[in-house]
Image (spheres, helix red, strand yellow):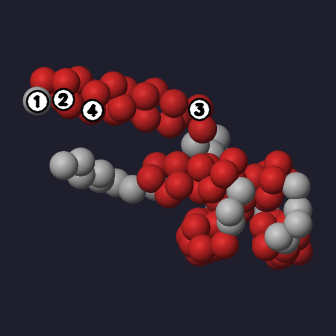
Amino acid sequence: MKVSKILLKLCVLFVTGSGAAIACDRYEDYTIDEIKEFRAMLGKEDADPLDRLFAFEQMVCSNRPNIRSYAIKQGLNTIQDPLVRNEVMFRSMMQKTRIDVE
């Protein structure tokens, strides 16, 4: 029991400590054309994983909440690249206001 509490505390420290560095510094105001370019890159199956990661990062830092939600849902549903999928799951978790661990 004590080991799991220690691990949970370490996880919380890791997430809160690194969350500030990984979260958006500020939300960006992208044009419709820029958002469409990011979406197209995110949807390309043969795109370089880094290009897809950068497109996802741009969309998830949009000043439009619907675009941020779309980026996460689209990423979780379609992206198979481990690099990008890891970032999608992390950003999804960081947007939660509460996380219950059992």
Q: CA distance from mark 1 to mark 4?
A: 11 Å
Q: Position of residue 91 (x, y in %)?
A: 54, 52
Q: Helix, strand or loop at disc 1?
A: loop
Mark 2 — residue?
5
Could you tell me which quadrant the N terminus lies in? top left
Q: How many marks?
A: 4
**Residue density around tag 4, few if under 14, some if 14–19, many if 20 or more, within 10 Å:** few
Labels 2, 3: front one: 2
Dots 2, 1 in contact, CB < 8 A:
yes
Labels 4, 3: front one: 4
| Residue drawn 43% across the image and 28% down it | 14
| Residue drawn 88% across the image and 55% down it | 48
The kind of residue on which mark 2 rests is Lys
Q: CA distance from mark 2 to mark 3?
A: 25 Å
Please give the label number shown on residue 63. Answer: none
Mark 3 — residue?
21
The kind of residue on which mark 3 rests is Ala
User: Which picture quadrant has residue 72?
Assistant: bottom right
